[in-house]
Image (spheres, rainbow, N blue to C red):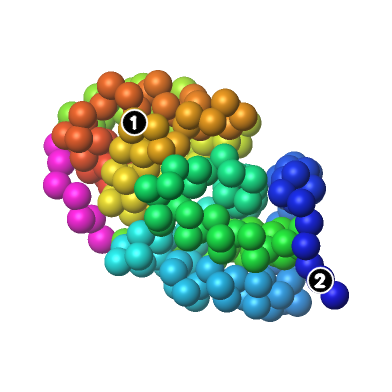
Amino acid sequence: MARTRTAAGIGAVIAVLGLALGGCGGPSAEEAARARTAFATCAACHGPEGQGNREVGAPNIAGLPAWYVVNQLRKFQIGHRAYVPEDSVGRRMAAAAQTLTQADDVAAVARWLGSLPPSPPPPTVQGDAQAGRVAYQACISCHEKDGSGRKDKNAPPLPGLADWYVVAQLQQFRDGWRGTNTNDPSGTTMRPVSIPLSDADIRNLAAYLVTMR
């Protein structure tokens, strides 16, 4: 049976799933097995347990909230992320996201990843954590003081994210590779916060986030 849908159709279904997953627990054994199968394409970059791989630009995603995974997969599928031709890593991710064409696959993968223990990688970015703490004050309204994030603002938890990935994404927001699609409100919220940041500011923020682990 062909597993094809329009991008708009996929987006609508996943948007509903994002709401439904808010109150759901972890996956059943059957759903976890289904998720592992569906995740096979993703595992080539993110690792079989979502531990990430810096060499290919794939962040650690184990332990991320299911609602956030669903929302990001939707953005990749409908072009709210990876819309800049130079973003080769993002475009590779967008292609992988298109393989999850069944709504129940997306839900299963999201719940399964959320049930995995986080695997924070070792620090790799040199920065001034104290200066980063000061700069982080602009992030608190969405990501909370402790970095735990807010679902209502689609702001993910930050402790445990790879510091190199934090640097890469802040640079993308600053430079217009993310956050310039007006149909992506959470992305456009990040953009003005990122624009004033220098490379040193971004490294400092990444160094501070490491201290939250």
Please name the amino acid that badge 2 sits on: Ala
Where's residue 95, x and y in %?
56, 60
Residue at the outermost right position = 1
Q: Is residue 47 above or below residue 206?
A: below
Give, as a single range, the part of the protein colored magenta: 122-128
Residue drawn at x 20%, y 55% as measured from the top left: 124
Residue 160 appears in the picture as rendered: no
Foreground mark, 2 or 1, reads 2
Disc 1 target residue: 174
Q: What amino acid is found at the position of numbered circle 1 in the picture? A: Arg
Examine the image and state in which quarter residue 40 appears: bottom right
Q: Nearer the viewer, residue 74 or 49?
A: 74
User: Magenta stretch: residue 145 in it?
Assistant: no
Which residue is at a point 34% across and 31% down the rendered structure image?
Answer: 174
Q: What residue is at 37 percent from the left and 42 percent from the top?
A: 169
Residues tagged 2 and 1 counted as in contact (Cβ below 8 A): no
Where is residue 184 drawn, in percent x and y? 58, 32
Q: Is residue 165 left or right of residue 156?
A: left
Identify the mark at residue 204; answer none if there is no mark: none
Q: How many marks?
A: 2
Q: 108 or 184: nearer the eye?
A: 184
Question: Which residue, as the protein is rendered here, is positioned at the far front?
Answer: 85
